Amino acid sequence: MVDKDKIRIIVQKLVEVYQPQGIYLFGSYAWGAPDNDSDIDLLIIVRDSSEKPHKRIKPAYQVLRGIKVPKDILVFTEAEFEKQATEPSSLFYKIKRDGVKLFEAA
C-alpha cells in the first residue's frame, strides 16, 4: 500500500510539471478499499491543451519515473472534465462527486 507522504510527493511533482487547475485522487485509495495490489488513480485537470488526452500523460510518467508506485494517470482539460462530469454514468461524474481533491489552483 502507498502512504499519504508518497502521494503528497507525487502530487507536488505533478503540480510542478502541469501547473494544473486541480488534481483528484479516485479509485480504491479515494473510495476506501485499497489493498496491496491497488494502484494510485489520479486525474489532472489542466486549463487547456491542444494535445490528445493520451499524449498529455507522458510528462507525468516521466517526472514520476523514479517513484516505484503503481499509478494510473489521466490528464484532461477543465472543459473536457466539466462536460463529461455532467453525465451520471461517467467516471468523471463519480470523480467529481466522490473523488478526493488533492490540489486546487488558487
Image (spheres, helix red, strand yellow):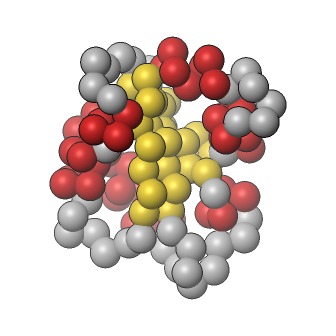
In the rendering, at what x and y percent does residue 37 appear? 55, 81
Q: Residue at x 43, y 23 (%)?
A: 77
Relative side of 97 to 14, left or right: right
Q: Residue at x 63, y 46 (%)?
A: 100
Q: Residue furthest right?
A: 88
- Up-down relation of residue 96 to residue 2 (above or below): above
In the rendering, at what x and y percent does residue 83 appear? 62, 17
- Up-down relation of residue 14 to residue 83 (above or below): below
In the rendering, at what x and y percent does residue 4 appear? 50, 65
In the picture, the quarter occupied by the C terminus is top left
Q: Can the viewer see residue 51?
A: yes
Q: Can the viewer see residue 15?
A: no
Q: How many marks?
A: 0
Query: Which quadrant of the structure image shows residue 62?
Result: bottom left
**Which sits in the foreground, 97 or 75?**
75
Q: Residue furthest bottom?
A: 36
